[in-house]
Image (cartoon, rainbow, N blue to C red):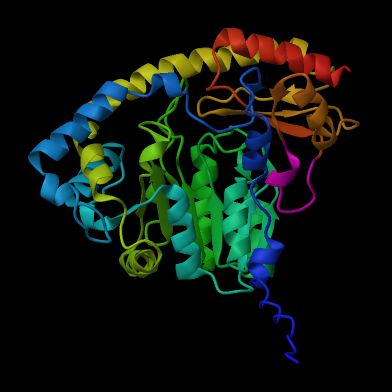
Amino acid sequence: MTVTSSPAALPPLAARARTVGGSPVREILAVTARPEMINFAGGLPAPELFDREGIAAAFRTVLEEASERALQYSTTEGEPALRQGVAARIHAQGLPTDADDLLITTGSQQALSLLASALIDPGDTVLVESPCYLAALQVFGLAGARVLPVPCDADGVDPAALQELIRAERPKLLYLVPTFQNPTGRTMPAARRAAVATAAARHGLWIVEDDPYGELRYDGERVPWIASFPGAEDRTVLLGSFSKVMAPGLRLGWLRAPAALRRACAVAKQAADLHTPTVNQLAAARYLDVLDGHVAKVRTVYGERRDAMLAGLPDALPAGSAWDRPEGGMFLWARLPESYDTTALLRRAVDHDVAYVPGEPFYAADPDRSTLRLCFVTQTPQEIAEGLRRLAKSLNG
């Protein structure tokens, strides 16, 4: 008689994979894909504004003139033409930068992952804004970091609270989105940026300055990068992306960092994907010649959509709600009266064919459940008005 035994159980997933959840935004988008849905939940650029012809022309030129190079493996650091073009744009905005200061990444999200690999050991402390870009919380969680929120006000992190946390917790890095922050839309003023740079220099701290939205300014004056302030020069990593101003499907971002850290990130990238797709890099380098004109058109449309949302909020949200007027970016953050739980209310909103992102997942600790994030760039002003009408009905329901 043959005796068969049951197969042995497989080893479990890594602890970090068991403890870090998926993106709530992605999950919301998956259940709100119906065509009748007005979706304020995503952080997606408006697809009708993509420069299809301009980007297609850039790809055609690259494939016609340099196909062997475009279809071949490339260097991990990135194509020289794209690094030179990005460096020139950064330099023109007041931060001296050479091509060799940059690493091209597969979206700026990869840059965050590379930094986590290069900088964070399990148990290291990372400071973040409160609330914070939620995909950064995912990255730091997967790296095994101890993530602590820094108290914030309308201008971003509180410098006194930051210094106290640095002294008490000895963190390795501080992660910030200082310009048109995701999710709040706020912008950190120059004096506050200078204070952050001084604190990092005094106490020995890396600053990760994420800037995916900086070119989407609709009014007000540009504020210099933290990386340009005294004390921050040798300890700030600046991240940028073409996803919001060119096309997210290209998956192109960049990382500007001091040499030793940049080399460590390049090694991590070799282990991750060898290099960012060559043809995409070369096409983007070609498209840089016309990018400013395209961004100007996008700014005009997005500014009108921001204004449409601001105009409709007083009638859409309950009495006692509060929100700010972002000078740029893609998001508007609202706080409802304390009795409202936006996570619990999301299902009712979806039943009314409108969606938002509850504020809860953006907090590293002690979430404010009365908050929510609204993306204003993907819908037309008419769709925004209708979406806010549906939102009002759901909240009053």
Quadrant location of residue 369?
top right
- Give the side of residue 180 with respect to residue 155, left or right: left
Q: How many marks?
A: 0
Does the magenta stretch mainly form a helix, a strand or a loop?
loop
- Give the side of residue 309 with respect to residue 260, left or right: right
Is residue 305 visible from the viewing direction of this image?
yes
Residue shown at 46% from the left, 20% from the top = 218
Residue 103, percent from left and from top: 31, 56
Q: Find out whether residue 363 is within the magenta segment.
A: yes
Residue shown at 66% from the left, 61% from the top = 147
Q: Nearer the viewer, residue 191 or 228?
A: 228
Screen quadrant of the C terminus: top right
Residue shown at 61% from the left, 20% from the top = 35
Residue positioned most to the top:
382
Q: Which residues are magenta?
A: 358-368
Q: Nearer the viewer, residue 346 or 308?
A: 346
Residue 154, percent from left and from top: 65, 35
